[in-house]
């Protein structure tokens, strides 16, 4: 049974592809959208901080605004669901910040235990100018989980990294001093006649056991 489950999961990954245009005659249901967002919500994050918030976009008007903010990519204009993942800016991750207190207090041992563990890594990030880079990178985890979860139930997707951050934040009425755009992910049903050949390097060329 374990080997069967492995094959089933790998088959999902083999079939997933970056859909560049969705069939607008086949919209996602409310249940589909809730499921995709739950895949994101359950995602792990560094120190369990959940650096992100998710904006689910479904209205035609808002989709058109994001189409403009994403340099008029057809995958955006034809999507049935757009998920904008934004992350908090560097001030939020100070060890004594209200955000760290709120998130860290949830874990066993309480906030003092959490900060004692977190402080060293935060200091390294801060010393190397990597705090916001670290926070942004967390956004790719829910993105990947949403895309894989969607593929498992026959929903297509595409990760969008080409966007105007200022326009995205303006569209969401978010303050750039507190928020930045991590990644945008679009979902829908692709067309059945699309060539979905999987292009990946052979395992022997990129996987090294040391």
Image (cartoon, helix red, strand yellow):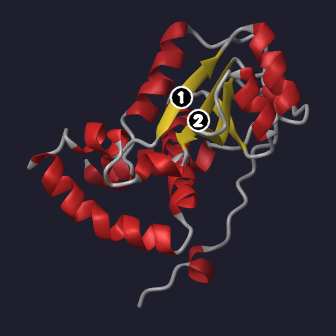
> Which is nearer the eye, 73 or 16?
73
The label shown at residue 54 is: 1
> Mark 2 — residue?
85
Question: At which x and y percent is residue 12?
Answer: 52, 43
Q: Residue at x 75, y 44 (%)?
A: 196
Residue with the most extreme bottom position: 210
CA separation, marks 1 and 2?
5 Å
The x and y percentages for residue 142 are 49, 41
Question: x%, y% of residue 40?
Answer: 46, 34
Front residue of this view, candidates 205 and 141? 141
Circles 1, 2 touching at the beta carbon (< 8 Å): yes
Vertical comparison of 31 with 4: above or below: above
**Which residue lies most toward the front here?**
96
14 with respect to 22 (left or right): left
Crowd band around label 2 with a 10 angstrom C-alpha radius: few (<14), some (14–19), many (20+): many
Label 1 neighbourhood size at 10 Å, few (<14), some (14-19), many (20+)? Answer: some
């Amino acid at each position: 049974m374990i080997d069967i489950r492995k094959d089933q999961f790998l088959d999902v990954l083999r079939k997933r592809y970056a859909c560049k245009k969705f069939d607008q005659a086949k919209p996602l249901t409310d249940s589909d959208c809730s499921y995709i967002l739950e895949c994101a919500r359950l995602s792990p994050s560094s120190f369990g901080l959940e650096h992100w918030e998710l904006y689910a976009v479904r209205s035609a008007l808002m989709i058109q605004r994001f189409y403009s903010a994403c340099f008029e990519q057809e995958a955006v204009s034809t999507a049935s669901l757009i998920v904008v993942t934004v992350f908090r800016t560097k001030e939020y991750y100070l060890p004594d910040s209200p955000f760290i207190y709120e998130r860290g207090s949830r874990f066993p041992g309480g906030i003092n235990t959490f900060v004692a563990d977190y402080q060293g890594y935060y200091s390294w990030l801060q010393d190397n100018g990597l705090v916001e880079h670290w926070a942004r990178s967390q956004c790719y985890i829910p993105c990947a989980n949403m895309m894989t979860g969607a593929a498992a139930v026959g929903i297509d997707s595409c990760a969008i990294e080409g966007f105007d951050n200022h326009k995205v934040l303006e569209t969401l009425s978010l303050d750039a001093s507190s928020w930045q755009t991590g990644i945008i992910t679009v979902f829908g049903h692709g067309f059945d006649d699309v060539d979905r050949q999987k292009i990946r390097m052979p395992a022997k060329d990129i996987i090294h056991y040391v």
